[in-house]
Image (cartoon, helix red, strand yellow):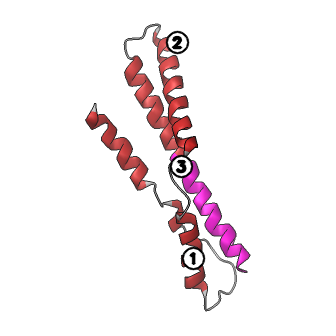
Amino acid sequence: MTLSILPLVSLIAACENSGAKYTPVIDGPVSANYNNDLAQCQSLAASQGTIDSSTAGAAAAGAGLGAASSVIWNDNSDNLGRAAAVGAVAGLTSNAIQKSQNKESIVKNCMRNRGYNVVG
């Protein structure tokens, strides 16, 4: 059981600051402070947590959906634990992707607020 948790821990660790390291596409000139502004915006995004109450909820919802679908599709509960584990990982993955996208948005908005024409 411990070995099955390791990929999950690795996934969460890998996603910790993936969105915070985003470098937006700027249209037009950049100021002399661009690198400093980008570093501050990335730091702001990185300060946002990766694991919060929604993470636990996503894991629980995924586990419940995985377990329920196993019972419905297989018409038995032989693989209930495995299905719940797969569902939990899917829920956590979805939550991690959302958090990464939120951090990218923070970087983009922060750079826009500093006067840059962010196009992507």
Q: Secondary structure at mark 3?
A: helix
| Mark 1 or 3, nearer chain start | 1
As drawn, the label of residue 72 is: 2
Residues packed near mark 3 inside 10 Å, few (<14), some (14 to 19) or many (20 plus): some
Give the labeled residue for mark 3: 97
Q: Secondary structure at mark 2?
A: helix
On screen, residue 43 versus residue 5, left or right, reads: right
Whether residue 7 is situated above or below residue 108 in the rendered picture: above
Majority SS type along the magenta span? helix
Mark 1 vs mark 2, CA separation in Å: 50 Å
Whether residue 8 is situated above or below residue 16 in the rendered picture: above
Count of numbered labels shown in the rendering = 3
Amino acid type of the residue that numbered disc 3 sits on in the rendered structure: Ile
Can residue 34 be seen from the camera position used here? yes
Q: Nearer the viewer, mark 1 or mark 3?
A: 1
Whether residue 86 is situated above or below residue 46 in the rendered picture: above
**Residue at the far bottom in the pictured view:** 32
Q: Residue at coordinates 64% horizontally, 62% vertically from top-left?
A: 105
Give the labeled residue for mark 1: 40
Q: Nearer the viewer, residue 73 or 57?
A: 57
How far across and down, in percent of the image, does residue 67 sit?
48, 20
Can residue 23 be seen from the camera position used here? no
Q: Residue at coordinates 62% horizontally, 73% vertically from top-left?
A: 25
Q: Residue at coordinates 47% horizontally, 30% vertically from top-left?
A: 87
How far across and down, in percent of the image, does residue 60 sit?
52, 31
